Amino acid sequence: MSQPDSTFELSRSLSDEEYLALEKKTGQQYELFEGEIFPLPPATYNHRIISANINRLIGKSVRGRFNFGTGDLRLKVEATGLLTYSDLFVTRGDLTMVEPGTTLINPIVLGEVISPSTELYDRTVKFEHYRQISTLSSYLLFSQSAPLVEQYSRETDNIWLYWSAAGPHATIDIPILKATLSLAEIYAGVEFGESFLRPFRH
């Protein structure tokens, strides 16, 4: 993993512009919040496989109706100032971009491939930021350790409905996209460890 350059004086608060310059210089993705940067961990093999499968499935489901992409496009939560990356984004209509650089602000769907090291953050702190995005309708969490997809769907500004799909034969509906995803396809090629829940295996 690339390390920040000492010339950026990371003991002090960084501006958005300095953060962007740091990413460009190091080739590393970071989150930025209130001037503090947080290196994003490298993706695991399962993470990469799941992300690629999701990208293909979402693309097939929404092509021509929505714009979509995965974790290479920076996201800004304007209400809180968080600059970060999401493993999946979907927008209705054109992408709305702001500085610094190519930074998205108008997703209707966001998704994260969670791991033991990121799960608590993705479920709590990051979701709290995401809930401040006025355009966001659905937040998806994709497990790496079992065929499990969870969805939070906005009912009102303060109420989010929750449902999940588990097991290789399950499907999950994403109402805002009028799309149904197969967990067998999401997890195609993924090798699960011993912690996998055996009743789901056939």
Image: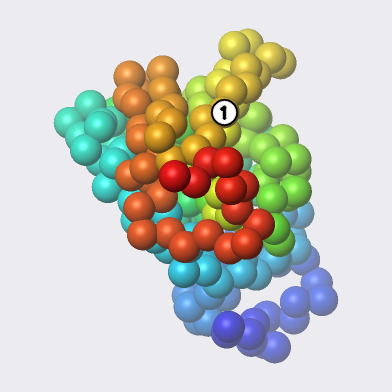
Residue drawn at x 70%, y 66% as measured from the top left? 37
Q: Quick one: label 1, few (<14), some, or many (20+) residues within 10 Å?
A: some
Above or below for 95 versus 119: above
Residue at disc 1, secondary structure:
strand
Residue 90: where, in percent of width, then height?
A: 38, 36
Residue drawn at x 41%, y 29% as measured from the top left? 171
Residue drawn at x 33%, y 19% as measured from the top left? 178
Residue drawn at x 31%, y 38% as measured from the top left? 58
Residue underneath mark 1:
164
Q: Is residue 129 visible?
A: no
The answer to which quarter of the image holds residue 59 is top left
Residue 48: where, in percent of width, then height?
A: 43, 63
Above or below for 3 versus 68: below
Q: Nearer the viewer, residue 142 or 189?
A: 189
Q: Nearer the viewer, residue 51 or 201?
A: 201
Q: What's the residue type where badge 1 is placed?
A: Ser
